[in-house]
Structure formats: C-alpha cells, structure tokens
Image (spheres, rainbow, N blue to C red):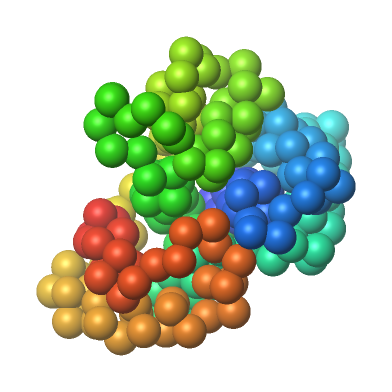
C-alpha cells in the first residue's frame, strides 16, 4: 500500500543519512549510502505514486539493500534511537517515526547557529556533501543543510506524510508526560553511540518537542 511504501522508504533514507554521518563512517559506507540516498530521492515518489511501477520498486529494493549494508558497517544515530522509543510508546510505524524526526535531527547534528558561523562542523560538511550530490543549493554549509532539510520536507509532502505526532493522532499531553522516559530510552539506545554529536537528555527532549 502507498503508506507502507512511504514509511519504509523514509526508513531507507534515514538509514542512509545516519550511516553517512555516523562517527564510524568511511569511504566504503559513504559510497553505499550516497547511492541509496540518490535512489530514494528519485524513485520513492514514483513507487508511492504507482505501486505497479516495477522499475521504481526495484530501485527502492536496491536502495534499501545498499543503505542496509552501509549501516550494518557503521551503525546509525539518534534519529533511530528516538524513533525506537516513540514507535514503541505510541505505536506508530518505524519508518514514520524516523520520518517525523529526520529534519530535526539533521538540524541538531549540524550544530549551525545563525548565518555568521565561520567554521562549520565536520557533520555539517557531510550533510552539505549530500546536498551537493543531490544537486541542491550549496552556496555554503548553512544553505546546503537548509536545502537538504527543505528537500526532505518536500519529499514528505509528496508522500502525504505527517510531520508531527499530533498529525499521527497522538495526544500532545500524552507525549509531554512521557518526554523524560523517551529521552532516557533514546540516550541508552545502541544507535546513540555512533551519533556524530553526543546528546544530553535535554537535547533529546528539545528534539522531541519539535515533533509534538
Ligand atoms: Fe530503520
């Protein structure tokens, strides 16, 4: 069904992006993740729009496999850590949970504050590389990271995906009451170890607040 295609496709994209910025990433995992990201951006909208588009389905299978090999080598990051917790607590599908978080985790990991940052982090530079190979606007790292986030939101809208937990039908008060517990679970998740930025509990809560 289209919604399962969208959710699982966004999971593939999250695997590839998190592998690309993992603390363990290397040239081989980057190559696998890069190809996966390009394939998802080109073929996920096609597979969603027409489930009988066999070429798009095949390309998404390949993207899923490539991203899987990439993260099998270098693991993931806090996008998955938080998604594991909110998926379990609120019973939303894994890919959908990842999708809700993706632009906010990129925002957090890139650590860009304002337009006057002279030195960009290595992670911001890697996100900028993604924008570069997707042929987005890469005037500087700040613009490049913004372009990547915009491209992801555009993709989510094409796939009619929710952008908040409220849009998934979750009661905001319930989320508020569980923020602490979710942050604890996410901090202790194995995927947090390879996130490019070491988060505090407060950092995780701030990310969570953005998707309520
Ligand atoms: Fe996943």
Does 178 sit above or below residue 152?
below
Q: Nearer the viewer, residue 111 or 130?
A: 111
Q: Quadrant of residue 143?
A: top left
User: Who is closer to the viewer here, 165 or 127?
Assistant: 127
Give coordinates of residue 51: x percent, y percent.
70, 40
Q: Is residue 166 above or below residue 186?
A: above
Residue farthest to the left?
173
Q: Residue at horizontal 72%, vertical 53%? A: 25
Q: Is residue 22 visible?
A: yes
Q: Residue 52: x percent and y percent?
A: 76, 37
Left/right of residue 171 with respect to residue 30 in the rendered view:
left
Identify the residue at image location x=55%, y=42%: 122
Q: Is residue 46 above or below residue 206?
A: above
Q: Residue at x 43, y 32 (%)?
A: 119
| 98 with respect to 20 (left or right) | left
Q: Position of residue 61 (x, y in %)?
A: 81, 48
Picture quarter with the C terminus: bottom left
């Amino acid at each position: 069904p289209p919604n399962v295609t969208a959710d699982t496709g966004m999971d593939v994209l999250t695997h590839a992006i998190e592998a690309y910025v993992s603390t363990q990433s290397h040239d081989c995992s980057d190559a696998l993740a890069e190809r996966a990201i390009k394939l998802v951006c080109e073929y996920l909208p096609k597979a969603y729009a027409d489930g009988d588009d066999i070429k798009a389905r095949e390309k998404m299978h390949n993207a899923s496999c490539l991203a899987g090999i990439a993260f099998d080598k270098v693991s993931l990051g806090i996008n998955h850590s938080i998604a594991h917790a909110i998926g379990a607590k609120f019973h939303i599908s894994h890919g959908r949970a990842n999708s809700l978080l993706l632009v906010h985790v990129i925002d957090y990991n890139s650590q860009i504050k304002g337009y006057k940052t002279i030195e960009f982090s290595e992670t911001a530079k890697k996100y900028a590389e993604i924008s570069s190979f997707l042929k987005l606007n890469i005037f500087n790292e700040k613009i490049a990271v913004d372009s990547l986030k915009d491209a992801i939101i555009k993709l989510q809208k094409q796939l009619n995906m929710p952008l908040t937990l409220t849009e998934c039908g979750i009661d905001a008060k319930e989320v508020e009451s569980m923020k602490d517990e979710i942050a604890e679970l996410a901090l202790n998740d194995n995927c947090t170890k390879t996130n490019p930025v070491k988060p505090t509990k407060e950092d995780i809560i701030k990310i969570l607040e953005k998707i309520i």
